[in-house]
Amino acid sequence: MQILVAEDDSITAEMIAHALEKFGYNVTVVNNGLDAYEKLRTGRFKLLVSDWQMPGLTGLELCELLRNQRTGSYIYVIMLTSHGGIENVVRGLEAGADDFLTKPFNPSELLVRIRVGERVLGLESRELMIFALAKLAESRDRETGAHLERMREYARILTEELSETEEFQNIIDGRYVDLIYLTTPLHDIGKVAIPDRILLKEGPLTAAEFEVMKTHTVLGAQTLEEVAQYAPSAGFLEMARDIAISHHERFDGSGYPYGLVGEDIPLCGRITAVADVYDALTSKRVYKQAYDHSLARKIILDGSGTSFDSRLVQAFLRREADFIAIQEEHGDEAEIFDSDSRRNAPC
Amino acid sequence: MFKTEWNFQQLHEKCFGNQALIEKLLVKFCSTLVDARTELKQAFSQSDYELIQSRSHRLKGEAGTMCCLKLHSAADRLCHAAKAHDVQDVEQLLEDVIACIDHLLKCDLMLGSIVESAASSDSSN
């Protein structure tokens, strides 16, 4: 596990780092709260040992900032402090600290508190639970195979690519990428509420049936919203809800359920839309054969600025090779329909 | 007498017997002591109690980490007095801290032999 130590006293920092490395952990040390925050935004660190008083951001301020950003994985915070007294303990806990270690620190105590943190973080098996839930929802649908595995990889790649651009680098950080990878599989969770006669129908849907099918977006988002009310600390549900409600919106307002336009569509929804359509195009479905990459690429390009955010299409083009690799690695076996023999496109 | 100034056995255990680390930290710490001495005296001459408080707080942490019990305790008392803006107490406690620092800096010369004897004790075990 990677541990971040934020301590401006270089002597204490060095001793803590040495002790943790001795215990087998990978340690990074920073000497101020701002650098600590930047490091934590990368998503690499799950555990923070932070001094109370530091330049830049204090340990308390750093903790509050982390807890106010309810996205990304949980970071376990141990406050290293010589501030005694119940009042300061309360302040620390209110700010969101998980544990305290009083100075001068004792290596054995440090180790047991780190291990407590590891146990708590281990309880966060949500990644497995989320994927299992999404898989269960998917199991009713004829779109089986590795659809969800591919979807989240496509979404991750697009998001990573966008994070390199000036326009998005202040919006997308390592934690955002982790989060979209985690929550994309829940995009169609609402389909569990769609009747079999519609969800599993082999032929084309009637207009009325399609209206019912479209409700999977709203139903999925409502479910996730209700869960979020019971678990307010589960910040990832916010992104999951946004993806569920908006992944069928179109950039020009021609999508559903609300006909949102442009940047009114959450970014995570716009990203999922590209991932979902690419996977639909390159996978066999009951109503079509799998298209090859060239054909899928053409269709997505044709939709740039209308169905899709053109910046995301550009990101897709820059990472085409990765999309192809994922399709090959996780692809379901299917006969490929290529550009030369194109029939009706699904979207 | 020395053990009340500096619990070297405890420092040795904290550093898991890593002699190189101990020596490195000792050098760093002694440099810190020299700076702290200067900064605290300057802060007092300027009646900057906030600076005395923050600097003595930091010194307390460093001394505690390095197992310098007496200095840790003295710095803690100075920190509290500075926080309370107790001028008389600050003056007296600052003298105590300075005396501790001076004594530790003299002890530094002795530490070379202690580090060596600890190293030879480790290898015989």
Image: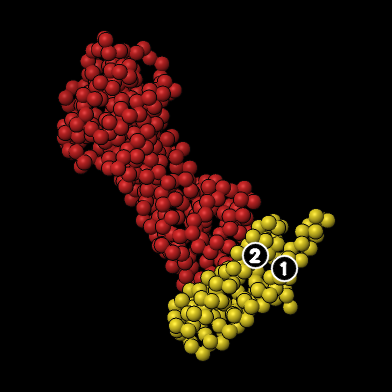
Q: Which chain is yellow?
A: B
Q: Which label number is shown at residue B111?
A: 1
Number of on-image labels: 2
Image: A308 above or below B91: above
Image quadrant assignment for residue A290: top left
Q: Is residue B112 left or right of residue A55?
A: right
Instruction: In the displayed orientation, state which residue is furthest to the bottom.
Output: B88
Instruction: Read off the chain for label 2.
Output: B
Q: CA distance from mark 2 to mark 1?
A: 9 Å
| Residue nearest the observer in this picture, B4 or A282 | B4
| Residue nearest the observer in this picture, A154 or A164 | A164
Tell me, yes or no, whether the two marked residues, 2 and 1, touch with CB atoms within 8 Å: yes
Q: Is residue B50 left or right of residue B73?
A: left
Which residue type carries mark 2?
Leu
Image: A324 above or below A64: above
The picture places residue A68, in percent across and down from the top left corner, at: 36, 56
If you read the primary sequence from the N terminus, does the residue marked by circle 2 or circle 1 appear first? 2
Q: Is residue B78 left or right of residue A301?
A: right
Secondary structure beneath dot 2 equals: helix
Secondary structure beneath dot 1 equals: helix
Residue beneath label 2, please? B26
The picture places residue A189, in percent across and down from the top left corner, at: 33, 35
Instruction: Read off the chain for label 1.
Output: B
